[in-house]
Amino acid sequence: MAPYRIVEHTADAGIHVTGGTLEELFADAARGMMSVICEVPPEGWPETHVVELSAPDAESLIVDWLAELLYLLEVKNFFTTDPRVEKVEGGAMRSVVGGARLRGVVHATEIKAVTHHMISVDRTLNGFETTIYFDL
Amino acid sequence: MPDWTKCFDSVSDYKIKIPRTCFEGMRVPGIIYAGPELLDDLKSDDAPQQVANVATLPGIVEYSLAMPDIHYGYGFPIGGVAAMSVEEGVISPGGVGFDINCGVRLLASAIEAGDARAKADELATKLFRDVPTGVGSTSDIRLRGGDMDKVLQRGAAWAARNGMGWDEDLEYCESGGALEDADPGEVGRRARERGANQLGTLGAGNHFIEVQEVEEIFDDRAARAFGLEKGMAAVMIHSGSRGLGHQVCDDAIRTMREAVVRYGYELPDRQLACAPVESPEGRAYYAGMCAAANFAWANRQCLAHTVRGTMERVFGASAERLGLRLVYDVAHNIAKFEEHEVGGKKRRLCVHRKGATRAFAAGHPELARRHAGVGQPVIVPGDMGSASYVMAGTPQAMAETWGSVCHGAGRVKSRTSAKKEFNAATVLEELAAHGVTVRAGSKKSLLEEAPGAYKNVDHVVNTCVNAGLATIVARLRPIVVIKG
């Protein structure tokens, strides 16, 4: 099964993500979100950013993680392509995020924000799953 | 998805009630305004659940309301309106949305629609060139020193006083284009970073600029008061508070998701995170939200200035000569303190409008002098292929919906299914057949916003009128559409 798929939403869009571990879940959620913005990653100068976050629970943490990548896109023009999530544990995470610094304007889908709408990170037989909606 | 129709209790042909007994925890009933032609869309959407969810919020007064353009959102439904008790109620960033003070501004003109049509290609190309759109776009407006704080405090007035507008523009903005309770200190570093280069940018998604024709006038007196004349061109601008507003909401939800635990609220959706209106968290959010709303008013003021400049160059006359006067600027994602009558007594309430427009009736003290006798202009954009409307608020809207009405056509198809179902060439052909010239950043954005993705705006407007919430003043038809 693909690690993420786009979920229909009347006004916006979401992704359903699965992962064997929380680290995989977080990395695939990042890939899923970036695919909503732009199906083919735009070109740019290679760059990496380190992201370290903590939050009260897994749901808040995954929303904050994706929101961080949106911030990097909007303020640093950094488009995530390779989110290497090293550790998600005890309400904290660390990732070395690979990607590209964009050279100009990209006519892509603008995600305004990552919502907390009906979010739940659930355990499954094979690991974890969640559905995350974006405000477009 | 539960069968909400089993809960629907028809109050009239245009009004449906969801009784409190329908969903556990509802403190008040839900009311959805929907005419017979909108019912099928309503039944196939899960938005009524969100109306019920909002009805569970502490301190909600009388009803959880939804306008006829209701569709599934996050937290509140789009089209949701809820008034909260100031003393016992909550304020929720999810009841305003991420795009704080997303709204619409309409400029009238003395340009014959035929002349605008004759220059449609040039207008489309030059507007698309002059107005920054798309992800990562920035404007030429540079905020220096304390400029950002001034924008956050003064809103549209900051732009107008810095050469980007006319003094009279401010009179025709809801709340004069600035909320005085704004506190720039409640707008964090990240929000400022996101907004730093975005003043005067359109954004993407459903944001647009349209040059339109005033096709039909339905109420001569109100049209005169609004400055609209049949056969003339008009310009509609739809945008909001850009990344700054999105971040203010994001930051507030982070604070409030912890406050929810502290205040012991049990919420059906985390996106409804909230805090008491009068709590430190509630007051901080409101002050920051007001500042973000002011940024949005400044943004639409800057966009209007760019549009006036483009029109001047295309038509070879000054904006004053072209009569590019502001008809009105309305917010449709906002929370405001307003006085309304509850059980025969005036009460100060915190009214949340999420995808809904304020629609105050004639005589309301907040209206511009010019509108005092006819009611507040309400701008209702339709899809890019059909029509938009200008309406006026009524006393019934004051009595039933806290002076609120719809904000647009309302989506009926998801972006994913719109992309699957429609074809860019066909959409462009159909728009051209309707006399509409489009410039969009990508095929994807064109398809996502294709006319077929929206409800029929006529049905939405008819419901408002038949329910007595507004009167129709004018219908406008698109000539040129610019999308991010």
Image: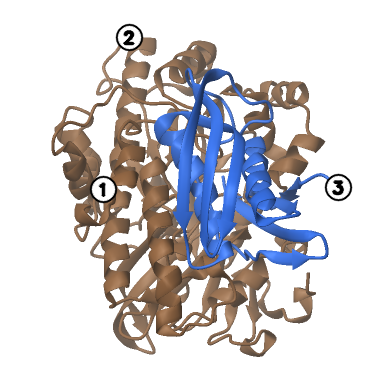
Chain colours: A blue, B brown
Residue at image coords 29%, 42%: B192
Which residue type carries mark 1? Gly
Q: Which mark is residue A1?
A: 3
Q: Chain of mark 1?
A: B
Secondary structure of residue under mark 1: helix
Which image quadrant: the N terminus of chain B? bottom right
Q: Which mark is residue B316?
A: 2
Are there few (<14), some (14-19), or many (20+) residues within 10 Å of tag 2? Answer: few
Q: Are the residues under marks 2 and 1 on the same chain?
A: yes
Of the pair B214 and B77, the residue shown nearer to us: B77
Report which quarter residue B446 is drawn in.
top right
Asked whether residue B196 appears in the rendered view, the answer is yes
Of the pair B54 and B315, the residue shown nearer to us: B54
Residue A12 at x, y = what percent?
A: 63, 49
Of the pair B193 and A27, the residue shown nearer to us: A27
Per the image, the residue denoted by label 1 is: B177
Q: Chain of mark 3?
A: A
Which residue type carries mark 3? Met
